[in-house]
Amino acid sequence: MIRYGSQTAGKIAKGFYGIIANNTFKITPNEYFDKIFLYYYLTQKSIYNFFRDSQSSSTMPAITFSMIGNLKIVMPPLPEQKAIASVLSSLDDKIDLLHRQNKTLEAMAETLFRQWFVEDARDDWEEVTLGEVADIKAGGDKPKHFSKRKTERYNIPIYSNGIDNEGLYGYTDSARIQAESITVSARGTIGFVCLRQEPYVPIVRLISIIPNDNFISSKYLYLWAKSQDIMGTGTTQQQLTVPDFSRTSFIIPPLEKMKKFTNYVDTFFVKMKFNETQISTLEKLRDTLLPKLMSGEVRVEYEH
């Protein structure tokens, strides 16, 4: 458990082996607790809120030994703890497998891109600037009406320049970008690239690049951008600007080869999108079950 930090105090990790940093607690359960059950118990939102509400209003929130000592835990019999841990772990194992599948599929697409367009570049390929083959836009202000959670009304994602969850900031009711495109973070972690396959709203510090299908595909553009070391400019704070990025030059193959490659790698991205939907479903199921299992509202069978 992380002891202090405005955004991270109270965060839990399991299965750690090695040296414990001075901003971390190591919690070792006794013989009455299953360690995986304890991990899941401590990841509940109610437990996070308990630690948050127990902290002082200092500039550096911190978890103390006394806070942990005062935490009351509802403890079912050890066999039931193990059964609960098994249910939740099986969901996390499936989620982890799907994440690993997506990493493999993306790595395969990147390998094919290098083989087709880096190792096998031809003289008849055309040198262009990014601004000549794509529409490049800076993100705007966050929408006036939005929700942090997806709802029936607010179902269009809003993206910022963050890395966590690909920069998902929240949801709104109207998209600014309809076409499949990519985004590149322009401030902070400059050069973080994401493929956007659904309508969305980009906000400040994020650049959207919408390809002209007569020259380039979004999949090609995404894999090209990921292969680049994208840098910003500025002396006090680095940033990526639309004019500078528009002048970036690179070579593109004939349209026929572009389309052939895009059709080939589309199967990878369709599978990745399907996996992402499965991940979201499993995460919602896990997060719904967690407090119910821990409170005893939902029980699991176990051997006495």
Image: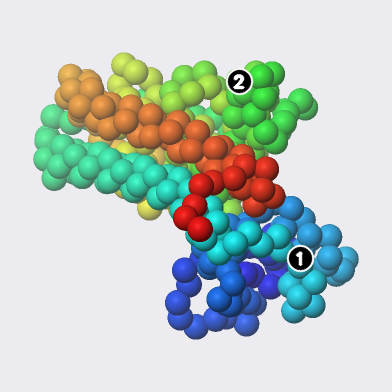
Relative image position of residue 246 (x, y in whole percent): 45, 35
Question: Can you give x and y, in whole percent of width and height, for residue 32 in the image?
Answer: 59, 72
User: Is any part of residue 297 visible from this angle?
Assistant: yes
Q: Which mark is residue 175?
A: 2
Residue type at the position of mark 1: Lys
- Spot occupied by residue 62 in the image (x, y as percentages of width and height): 76, 71
Tell which of 148 and 299 is nearer to you. Answer: 299
- The residue under the point 55% across, 64% down is 78
Q: Tell me the mark number nearer the camera, choosing from 2 and 1.
A: 1
Residue 160 image position (x, y, % from top left): 60, 40
- What distance separates the C-alpha of mark 2 from that of mark 1? 45 Å
**Amino acid type for the residue under numbered disc 2:** Ala
Give residue 245's mark: none
Above-or-below relation of 110 to 6: above
Residue shown at 55%/56% (left/top)? 80
Mark 1, residue position = 72
Which class describes the residues within 10 Å of circle 2: few (<14), some (14-19), or many (20+)?
some
Q: Relative to the observer, which residue lies in front, 159 or 137?
A: 159
Q: Is residue 256 left or right of residue 135?
A: left
- Left or right position of 257 against 20: left
* Quadrant in the picture for the N terminus: bottom right
Of residues 147 and 137, the one nearer the viewer is: 147
Disc 2 secondary structure class: loop
Residue at the image point whose x is 58% and y is 69% from the top: 33
Where, by quadrant of the figure, is residue 37 drawn? bottom right
- Badge 2 or badge 1: first in the primary sequence: 1
| Figure quadrant of residue 255 | top left
Lateral position of residue 14 relative to residue 297, left or right: left
Q: Is residue 23 above or below residue 71?
A: below
Considering depth in this image, is 223 or 49 the residue closer to the camera? 49
